[in-house]
Amino acid sequence: MSMNLHCDKVELYQTPTWVTYSCYYKEIIEKGKVKQVEEDWPNIRYKYSCWVKDMYYNKPNWNIVVEKHVAELYSYKSLRFYIN
């Protein structure tokens, strides 16, 4: 089952499950135990943007599309990300 990252204001590119989890969660160590907690939206946006740039930026004619997509993400003062 694929778990995709979504955003309330911007349509995101389809993310592989591992990218979704990497963006959405962070692991913390509390009392010697590792657990996952939800990231805050600026960190999710940053991680997702890094993945998009890495995946698509060097593909022919995609650099402009990626720049616009990332700029749109950074144009909002607040975003809500979720997994679906």
Image (cartoon, rainbow, N blue to C red):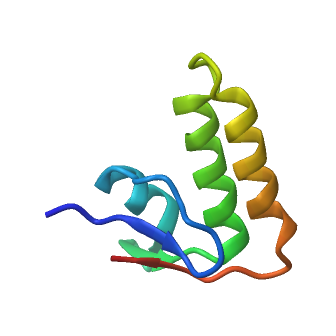
One can see residue 61 in this view: yes
In this orientation, which residue lies closer to the viewer: 56 or 32? 56
Rendering quarter of residue 39 = bottom right
55 sits to left or right of 45: left
Q: Count the marks.
A: 0
In this orientation, which residue lies closer to the viewer: 27 or 57? 57
One can see residue 27 in this view: no
Q: Name the spot of residue 66 as percent of width and height, x first.
A: 68, 39
34 sits to left or right of 11: left
Q: Name the spot of residue 65 as percent of width and height, x first.
A: 69, 39
| Image vertical order of residue 11 relative to residue 76, above or below | above
Quarter containing the C terminus: bottom left
Judged from this view, the residue extending furthest toward the left is: 1
Quarter containing the N terminus: bottom left
43 sits to left or right of 26: right
Q: Name the spot of residue 74 as percent of width and height, x first.
A: 82, 62
Q: Residue at x 28, y 66 (%)?
A: 3
Q: Name the spot of residue 29 as percent of width and height, x first.
A: 46, 70
Q: Residue at x 77, y 47 (%)?
A: 68
Q: Residue at x 33, y 51 (%)?
A: 18
Q: Residue at x 63, y 28 (%)?
A: 62
